[in-house]
Image: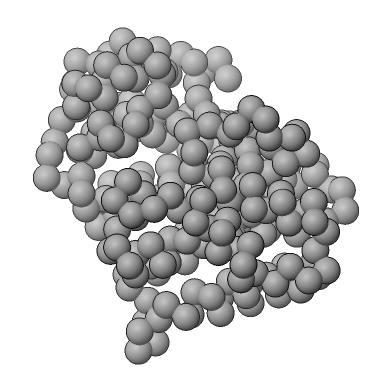
């Protein structure tokens, strides 16, 4: 493999192709394939904006972005869901798949661990405090890139009326879950266990803003008006204190 982004893409494409049936991916798998390439471009762009230009940094940014959702393809094939609580932790499983199947020939052991750690921790509530700084920054990078794309994707689908194709389980209920509101009010975070509706998902998304690691990520989404759009969507619900508090923290970032 060596440090070749072209070869990494070939490995990824070959891996994804193994899930095709009669030449086609399931619609949700195709969404994840496209998401993976968008996140790859975002991760590379953020790393460049941060002037990460040490040897192999360009490959690492490309690799963590492209490979972060490796486990999503088998997850959907086997469980017909992307809900980790109903299947498996896709970060942990992705790291396991990559450790066993990716072509690591010529890749430094330390760089391998950076990729595996970034994949393993990209979906966790937070990055473990004991992760070394040399690895931590790659975990932080993929978490930002992943969130930016999901923010954009959800907003785009709300605008064009297809959001429930992406979030089908949130279609059955509307309004905000009292349990989720109280969780966010108390902790500043929201868990999917308390999310039932699109409005719940949007409130959780707003809390994600406080988990962004790099100023360029926050500025990008602020300039696109996405945080304000979420706040406006939640205006009709009695959560002005919660939303206002989150927006104040975002503005202070």
Up-down relation of residue 37 to residue 237 (above or below)? below
The answer to whether 224 appears left or right of 25 in the picture is right
Up-down relation of residue 62 to residue 191 (above or below)? below
Q: Nearer the viewer, residue 148 or 132?
A: 132
Q: Nearer the viewer, residue 217 or 94?
A: 94
At a point 55% along the width and 64% down the height, the residue shown is 97
Is there any visible trace of residue 116 in the rendered image?
yes
What percent of the width, then of the height, locates residue 129? 64, 27
The answer to whether 92 appears left or right of 176 in the picture is right
Up-down relation of residue 105 to residue 96 (above or below)? below
At a point 46% along the width and 14% down the height, the residue shown is 248
Q: Nearer the viewer, residue 196 or 228?
A: 196
At a point 58% along the width and 20% down the height, the residue shown is 253
Is there any visible trace of residue 145 in the rendered image?
no
Q: Quadrant of residue 190?
A: top left
What percent of the width, then of the height, locates residue 150? 43, 47
What percent of the width, then of the height, locates residue 37? 55, 62
The answer to whether 53 appears left or right of 121 in the picture is right
Q: Quadrant of the N terminus?
A: bottom right
What percent of the width, then of the height, locates residue 140? 63, 38
Q: Residue lying furthest bottom in this view?
A: 22
């Amino acid at each position: 493999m060596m440090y070749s982004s072209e070869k990494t893409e070939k490995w990824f494409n070959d891996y994804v192709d193994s899930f095709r049936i009669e030449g086609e991916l399931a619609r949700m798998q195709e969404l994840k394939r496209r998401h993976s390439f968008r996140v790859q471009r975002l991760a590379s762009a953020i790393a460049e904006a941060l002037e990460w230009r040490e040897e192999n940094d360009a490959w690492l940014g490309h690799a963590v972005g492209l490979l972060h959702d490796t486990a999503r393809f088998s997850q959907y094939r086997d469980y017909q869901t992307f809900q980790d609580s109903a299947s498996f932790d896709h970060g942990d499983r992705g790291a396991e798949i990559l450790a066993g199947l990716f072509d690591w020939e010529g890749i430094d052991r330390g760089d391998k661990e950076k990729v595996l750690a970034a994949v393993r921790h990209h979906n966790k509530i937070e990055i473990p405090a004991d992760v070394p700084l040399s690895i931590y920054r790659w975990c932080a990078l993929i978490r930002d890139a992943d969130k930016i794309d999901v923010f954009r994707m959800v907003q785009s689908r709300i605008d064009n009326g297809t959001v429930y194709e992406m979030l089908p389980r949130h279609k059955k209920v509307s309004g905000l879950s009292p349990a989720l509101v109280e969780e966010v009010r108390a902790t500043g975070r929201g868990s999917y266990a308390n999310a039932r509706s699109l409005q719940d998902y949007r409130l959780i998304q707003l809390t994600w803003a406080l988990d962004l690691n790099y100023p360029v990520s926050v500025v990008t989404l602020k300039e696109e008006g996405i945080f304000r759009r979420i706040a406006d969507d939640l205006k009709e619900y009695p959560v002005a204190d919660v939303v206002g508090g989150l927006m104040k923290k975002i503005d202070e970032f």
